[in-house]
Amino acid sequence: MKVKMYIKEALVFGVLFVVISSAVSIYRTSQMQIGDAVCQKRSGIVYFWATWCPVCKMTSPNVSRISEEFVVLGIAVRSGEREKVQAYMQEHDLHFANRNDFDGTTAAGYGVNVFPTIVFCKNGHVKMAEVGYMSTLGLWLRAWLFTS
């Protein structure tokens, strides 16, 4: 009987954690200055990252995993020439569409100055933006909730 009780408590805690963290994320998104233009009139994920960013090195494989199921556009910020970024992506087995933002003007123009920043878009509108590390499950859940 105690095992069932512990499982039930763990499930309740998990659901509460997801609900509360999503509410906090939605609030933080409202405080960011990222406009709908970043979504380019479509649904999906826009992933601002950099080859020199240590947190991006942990997040990028997770983004690559969900890019098999969701539309992802990466924007590599201040990471060198296009060929260098492509070589990095190949070396690290990253398989999402990517644009090179050589000097950071694209990211700055969208109000992004912290990396990684992950923007979830639906029908051309920003629904949520997250900064920092995100697990594959966290990415998948947010993508499912906010881009589908």
Image (tube, grey):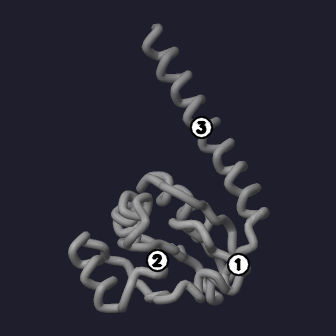
The residue furthest top is 1
Question: Which mark is in front, 1 or 3?
Answer: 1
Amino acid at the residue labelled 3:
Val
Q: Position of residue 25 (x, y in %)?
A: 67, 54
Q: Residue at x 48, y 55 (%)?
A: 134
Judging depth in this view, the residue of 140 and 26 nearest the camera is 26
Q: Position of residue 21 (x, y in %)?
A: 64, 45
Question: Which mark is in front, 3 or 2?
Answer: 2
Quadrant housing residue 110: bottom right
- Is 147 left, or right, of 98 in this rendering? right
Judging depth in this view, the residue of 2 and 32 nearest the camera is 32
For marks 2 and 1, the one nearer the N-term is 2
For marks 1 and 3, the one nearer the N-term is 3
User: Residue beneath label 3, please?
Assistant: 15
Query: In which quadrant will I find the C terminus?
Result: bottom right
- Within-10-Å neighbours for mark 2: few <14, some 14–19, many 20+: many
Asked if the residue under mark 2 is in contact with the one under mark 3, i.e. CB atoms within 8 Å, the reply is no
Q: Position of residue 8 (x, y in %)?
A: 53, 23
Q: Position of residue 20 (x, y in %)?
A: 68, 42
Amino acid at the residue labelled 2:
Val
Q: Residue at x 64, y 82 (%)?
A: 108
- Cα–Cα span, label 2 and label 1: 15 Å
Amino acid at the residue labelled 1:
His
Quadrant housing residue 118: bottom right
Name the secondary structure under disc 1.
strand
User: Residue beneath label 1, please?
Assistant: 125
Q: Please determine whether, in this image, residue 132 is positioned above or below residue 16.
A: below
User: Residue beneath label 2, please?
Assistant: 72
